[in-house]
Image: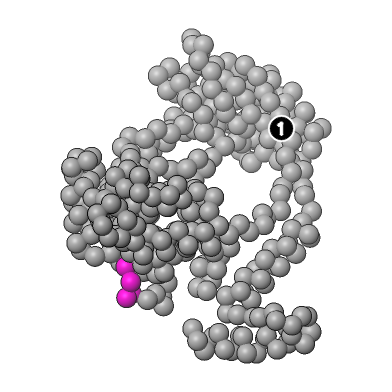
Amino acid sequence: RRILDRLVGYGVSPILWAKVKGRLSAGRVQSVALRLIVEREREILAFVPVEYWKISAIFEPDGSKKQYKARLFKLNGDDPVLPDEDTTLAVLKKLEKAAYSVQSIDRSTRSVRPGAPFITSTLQQEASTRLGFLTRKTMAVAQQLYEGINLGVGEETGLITYMRTDSVHVSAQSVSEARDYIKSKYGEGFLPDKPPVYRTRAASAQEAHEAIRPTSTMRTPESVKNHLTADQFKLYKLIWQRFVASQMKPALIETTTVDIFGGMGEENCIFRASGSQTLFPGYRAVYAVMKGEDEKEDEDQTNLPLDVLTEGQKQKLVSLKPTQHFTEPPPRFTEASLIQVLEENKI
């Protein structure tokens, strides 16, 4: 690390002083981060939006008044190409005359594992996303929690382990304590047979420090809330929940996908709708998923009336809705997304 600092800093900083402005500095992290930001900005400036359209429909199962939403998924076996309003309106006219029925109802179950205990970068990302904390604030508050808080027992108590770490390793004692808490609070059904094993992603990780975790799982956020500032409580709760969740069973999610076939003479179409439900919350009983965070959530999601839907059943087309869209440039980095890209590049 020191060698990289000197190679970059000693080599590039004098050029900055001579060519740009005095007192500027270059570094192995900040210079790469700046380049990433500049490259992203150039992508945004060079971006040319492209128009496209989507079509969604409201269907009503035969013999029922329950309605649900689906989107146009296939047109004559191919992905629908709707580049402009005229093309879309022509397709709409055909869709209005089609006869619809349920082609298939497919159910699948997937297991969603909890994330590993926090390391510095993941804590910064989650605190940014969930709490709106800037990186500087996250580390300052974490420092306070690490150095110690007066919990009314006459001396300060460190609430978390060291907050500068890139290792996901945790002590056997902390795992045992977390398992005892989970068993007593949620029951054995939420406890894996064996503690989950997480692998440190960074090849050059410093294994001297553990992951960021509470020094005692039994010291719940609510039990220390009165001794913490609002920011300290929010961050401690996030760290505590993430660690406890990391020692719990995966969540089980059932996804149902319904394809509705539409016959239009020699042409045909398929509309698709999906719905999901949680069969078993697992770790999400502690560490709730944020909206849009689940990679399987998509635009097809809707409340399906599964109690009245059957394969081959006729479907009444209630309405069609075309919507205009434009492709968007890549977004500017947030602190969280910049940290993530730096980490992916092993910086």
Q: Residue at x 54, y 71 (%)?
A: 345
Image quadrant where residue 321 sits:
top right
Report the front residue among 127 and 7.
127
Tell me where residue 13 appears, x and y as whole percent. 67, 85
Taken as a whole, is the magenta stretch helix, strand or loop? loop
Residue position marked by numbered label 1 in the rendering: 323
The three-letter amino acid code for the residue at tag 1 is Thr
Position of residue 8 measured from the top left corner of the image (x, y, whole percent): 61, 85
Q: Is residue 177 above or below residue 5?
A: above
Give the quadrant of residue 107.
Answer: top left
Give the residue displayed 71% in from the left and 29% down from the top: 322
> Does the magenta run of residues contain 208?
yes
Q: Residue at x 68, y 35 (%)?
A: 54
Q: Nearer the viewer, residue 192 or 35?
A: 35
* Residue 87 counted in the magenta span: no
**Which residues lie in the magenta part?**
207-211
* Residue 160 can be seen, yes or no: no
Residue 139 image point, x, y percent:
47, 63
Q: Is residue 32 above or below residue 307?
A: below
Based on the displayed image, in which of its 4 quarters is residue 26 positioned? Answer: bottom right
Instruction: Answer few, some or many: residues within 10 Å of disc 1's Cα (few below 14, many 20 plus, some between 14 and 19).
Output: few
